[in-house]
């Protein structure tokens, strides 16, 4: 009798384990399975202060995020089912932590990007909004000495926010 109970319990456990399906997504994406393509249009730099490499750097980094984090095909000349376009609207530095001697102890570099996102499959997820991020740096350093590293980190934050807004729907 105990053998029958053990076999029955084993069968039930095996059935439950094989019947349950758990999906994991390390990227956190919630894209519809109908979405097959994406496109990223060139983002011109319209900020008052222009970093000459920023447009290309941002556009390519956004494309790379979608190439690396999704299985979508990129449409190069045209618009994909997910389409990103916009412009860089802000690139500025400002002094922070001004001391009694009117000397800044810290400076901040801020980048702002306006993004127009269209989703042909789920138009309710479309958005038109600005994304911004910043990094602080020691005022004893020149911006030109730290700019390249700061820009990479800032763009990473902005692109993560864009990805989350477009794909994860946070």
Image (spheres, rainbow, N blue to C red):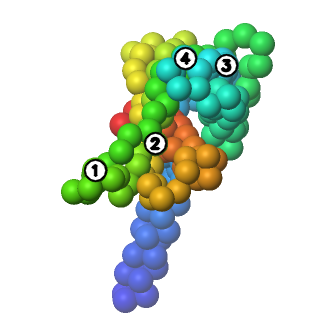
Q: Which mark is residue 109?
A: 2
Evaluate whether residue 136 shows in this view: yes
Marks 4 and 3 sit apart, C-alpha to C-alpha, by 12 Å
How many numbered marks are there?
Answer: 4
Q: Position of residue 108 (x, y in %)?
A: 41, 46
Distance from label 2 to label 1 (Cα)?
19 Å
Question: For numbered disc 2, what is the local secondary structure?
Answer: strand
Q: Nearer the viewer, mark 3 or mark 1?
A: 1
For marks 3 and 2, give the one nearer the viewer: 2
Label 3 crowd (10 A; few <14 / some 14-19 / many >=20) = some
Q: Quadrant of residue 168?
A: top left
**What is the CA distance from the residue labelled 4 to the residue labelled 2?**
16 Å
**Local crowd size for mark 4, using a 10 Å CA cut-off: few (<14), some (14–19), many (≥20):** some
- Mark 2 or mark 1: name the one nearer the start of the chain: 1
- Pick the residue in front: 49 or 13: 49
Q: Residue at x 73, y 26 (%)?
A: 74
Mark 3 or mark 1: which comes first in sequence? 3
Q: What residue is rendered at 38% in x and 54% in y?
A: 106
| Chain-order first, disc 4 or disc 2 | 4
Category of crowding for the residue at label 1, using alpha-carbon neighbours closer than 10 angstroms: few (below 14), some (14–19), many (at least 20):
few
Quadrant where the image shows the C terminus: top left
Q: Nearer the viewer, mark 1 or mark 4?
A: 1
Residue at 49% across, 38% down: 158
Residue hosting label 4: 46
The residue that mark 1 highlights is 102
């Amino acid at each position: 009798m105990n053998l029958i109970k053990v076999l029955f319990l084993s069968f039930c456990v095996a059935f439950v384990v094989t019947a349950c399906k758990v999906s994991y997504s390390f990227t956190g994406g919630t894209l519809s399975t109908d979405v097959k393509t994406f496109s990223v249009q060139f983002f011109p730099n319209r900020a008052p202060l222009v970093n000459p490499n920023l447009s290309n750097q941002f556009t390519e980094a956004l494309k790379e995020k979608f190439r690396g984090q999704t299985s979508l095909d990129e449409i190069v000349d045209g618009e994909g089912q997910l389409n990103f376009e916009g412009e860089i609207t802000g690139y500025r530095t400002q002094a922070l932590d001004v001391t009694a001697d009117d000397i800044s102890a810290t400076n901040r570099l801020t980048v702002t990007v306006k993004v127009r996102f269209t989703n042909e499959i789920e138009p309710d997820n479309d958005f038109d909004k600005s994304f911004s991020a910043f990094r602080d740096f020691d005022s004893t350093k020149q911006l030109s000495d730290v700019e390249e590293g700061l820009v990479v980190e800032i763009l990473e934050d902005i692109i993560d926010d864009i990805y989350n807004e477009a794909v994860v729907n946070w």
